Amino acid sequence: MKLTHEERAMLAGEMSEPVRWAIDHQLKVGRMFDAVDLVPVSQSHMMADPESVGDAGVDFMERLADQGARVAIPMITDPRGVDLDYYRPLGQTEEMADIDRRTIAACERMGILMTNTCINYQTVMSPVLGDHVAFGDTGVVIYTNSVCGARSNYEGGPSALAAGLTGRTPRYGLHLDERRRATRRFRVEAQPRELTDWGVLGAVIGRRAGSYWEVPFIEGIDVVPTSDDLKHFGAAMASYGSIPLFHIEGITPEAPSADAIGADALDIERVTEADLDALRSGFGSPGDKVDVVVFAAPQLSLVEMQQLARYSEGKRFVSPVIVCTSPQVYADAMRMKLVEALEAAGAKVLQGTCFYNQYAREIGEANGWTRLLSNSAKIVNILGGYGYQPALASMQRCVDSAMAGEIV
Amino acid sequence: MINLKCHVGIGPRVEGEALVADDNFSARYDLDRINGVFSRPQHKLAGQSYVDRILVLNTAKGGVASAWMLHEMKSRGIAPKAILFNAANTILAQGAALADMTMCDRFVDGDVTTLIRTGDRLVVDPEAGLVTITNR
């Protein structure tokens, strides 16, 4: 790979040992994906939930901090595995909380901003068209690439950390123009109306396209979606298909038209109401009992918090209800009494976590929860692998079901 | 001796015994990482130990979290010696780089899960992009 004078000094260990580790890591990854050089990035975002990091990962981060590691660019974090204000009632252990406490301490010593959010594009600093960034969390990456028109690969925790330390990332994949051209063309024939519809549509397209190197171009959408709509759409597409980038004709910045992004020559694949129904049919039906209702994946925006609070006003939940949001939104939602409204109905609002990466398996076992209901197409996909029987319904129906103790 | 050319990979040169399946790999959902066996019942290697084997599989699945997991597995000594894929994904390659675990993909001669058989003795040289089957 072609290195600048400064990068060669990093590799020679002239900056610090953490920077040498970081650039060495990036060169290994870059060579595997034929990167020609490194590209400067403006931000980094790291997934480091304790469940995946483990003791070894925390030891590793503590060692870097001991060696004086300091991030070179603004670096933020994905949700934590434990809400330190509320974990024992969920059946989470002191050991789990300790891994998180150590991770937080190590990250803070390195100058990392503990945003603990997977909706940083709504709450922290949204990247702009053409911005190169190093983001973790598949939902964050697909939104950043598609809706913002910024450029990021899926950067796992170690690689996001490396990018934070060097201020660069290997230039491969989505950093390159040619990898952002459309490879599949979908015509949507059933209009999404609310968040879960968007999630289901994303899931269907993700499952069909099904690879990190496919770029779906989508036409036939007759509404202008909100940021929350596209958040659920992208998160589901990434979850079902490992897709890091989509284009919607006339909506996303790189696709004013099919020919602008190379989709005009592609065969059209139809997405029909029947396709969406087929996906939904795998996730519960009216009358099924509900052990727990979860609103998460991605964390709720302030607007979603308000919507949910309105639906919940004056209600009383029979089933446990868990709501996950970012610490940034949580503070606002407290001030605006949305948390109060939700908790008065019997919900619990968690901050800085997201249900599926906060030891979902152990929480389920501790509380006897298997039949989980959510409005997130992403979470129902993931939690099947964690011993749950997940069901999917709109936000309104989730609220009504939580009152009835079964899917209505 | 059979030489199989692949893309330049990650990690040190290693020797070991192959464990092969025409299936995919998710560190998060397919494995019992404590006991070192494939645990998802639907996986073609369900019940088999992956410890110190050279896994040969189709592709890598799973989200960003799995990048930490190879490192965590290797730190406890309950890990595969290497993983060969038809196509690795970016996350698992990053995970291999952190763990210093050998990983190669993109084999010139076709589907690596049919080119290599379970029980084959392999030498994997990621630097050269070369896997050698020494017992045939």
Image (spheres, helix red, strand yellow):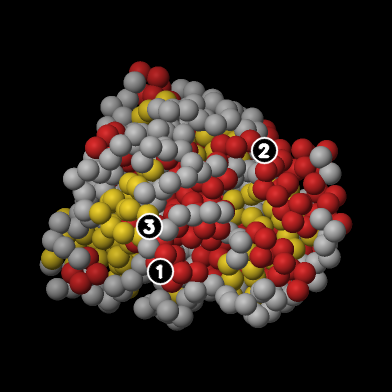
Q: Which image quadrant is residue A9 in? A: top left
Query: Is residue B76 in view from this perspective?
Result: no
Residue identified by numbered label 2: A114
| Mark 1 in CB contact with mark 3 (< 8 angstroms) | no
Residue identified by numbered label 3: A189
> N-terminal of the two: label 3 or label 2?
2
Residue identified by numbered label 1: A274
Q: Secondary structure at mark 3?
A: loop
Separation of residues labelled 1 and 3 (CA atoms):
10 Å
Q: Which residue is located at x 49 percent, y 54 percent?
A: A192
Q: Is residue A62 left or right of residue A213?
A: right
Separation of residues labelled 3 and 2 (CA atoms):
42 Å
Q: Chain of mark 1?
A: A
> N-terminal of the two: label 2 or label 1?
2
Query: Is residue B48 in view from this perspective?
Result: yes
Q: Which residue is located at x 67 percent, y 43 percent?
A: A303
